[in-house]
Image (tube, rainbow, N blue to C red):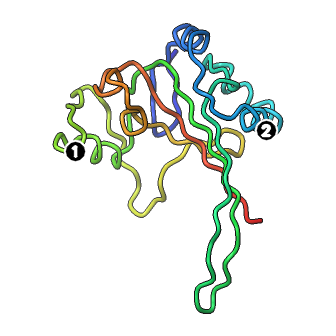
Amino acid sequence: MLADFYPWKIDVDIEATKRFYDENDWSEDKAANQKFCDVMTGKQKQFFSALGIDVHKVKAEERVHEIPDEEETPGGKIYVRTLDFLFCGTFLSIPDYQWNLYNDEEIVGMRLPETLEVVEMPEGEKLPVYDIDGWCCVFKHPFFRMEEKRFKQWDCGYVLGSILLMKDI
């Protein structure tokens, strides 16, 4: 299935993703996964279902960050929830900032295919995200987060999606 998550285009293998989640459980905190499931909208549930992702088996984390007072600025606490999920597929296009990052062979250690489309983002635009009914998602190559050798080559067959939610408390 060709998925257009502007500025990312990804060739998604839904059946392989379903098999991946049948065989793997990446979750570390089942209660955090359940909290995500409990607050998901119908569109968010449909997004994950359409890609073959079992949200009960992805990596969900919750934490509270203490922000210290700084001179005239009062500190506080921020509640942070993250949801990281793998799915089977390959990038067809990525934004230019990722090209610049991933194309540095000395840092990344891999070569990008010439067929990969690079989407030039407008000057001064914030970090691009894909909106999943109010949840901002970034799609990445999994090599920065995954230690396994299979993720250390460009055509590893996986894409990592990351959602970050923050709220003052």
In the rendered structure, the answer to whether residue 29 lies left or right of residue 138 reads: right
Q: Find the distance from the CA under tag 2 to the CA under tag 1.
A: 36 Å
Q: Check the image and report above or below for 28 versus 88.
A: below
Q: Amino acid under label 2?
A: Lys
Estimate the x, y position of residue 36 in percent, counting from the top left.
75, 37
Q: Which mark is residue 35?
A: 2
Q: Farthest residue to the front: give it.
A: 28
| Left or right: 34 as drawn, with respect to 115 | right
The answer to which quarter of the image holds residue 92 is top left
Picture quadrant of residue 66: bottom right
Q: Pinpoint residue 115: horizontal percent, then vertical percent.
A: 26, 25
Where residue 123 sits in the image (x, y, percent)? 38, 61
What amino acid type should be assigned to the residue bearing mark 1?
Ile
In the image, is residue 148 above or below residue 163? Answer: above
Q: Residue furthest bottom?
A: 72
Residue position for label 1: 107
Q: Give the mark, 2 or 1, whose residue is nearer the N terminus.
A: 2
* Quarter placement of the C terminus: bottom right
**What residue is rendered at 45% in x and 35% in y?**
8
- Local crowd at mark 2 within 10 Å, few (<14), some, or many (≥20)? some
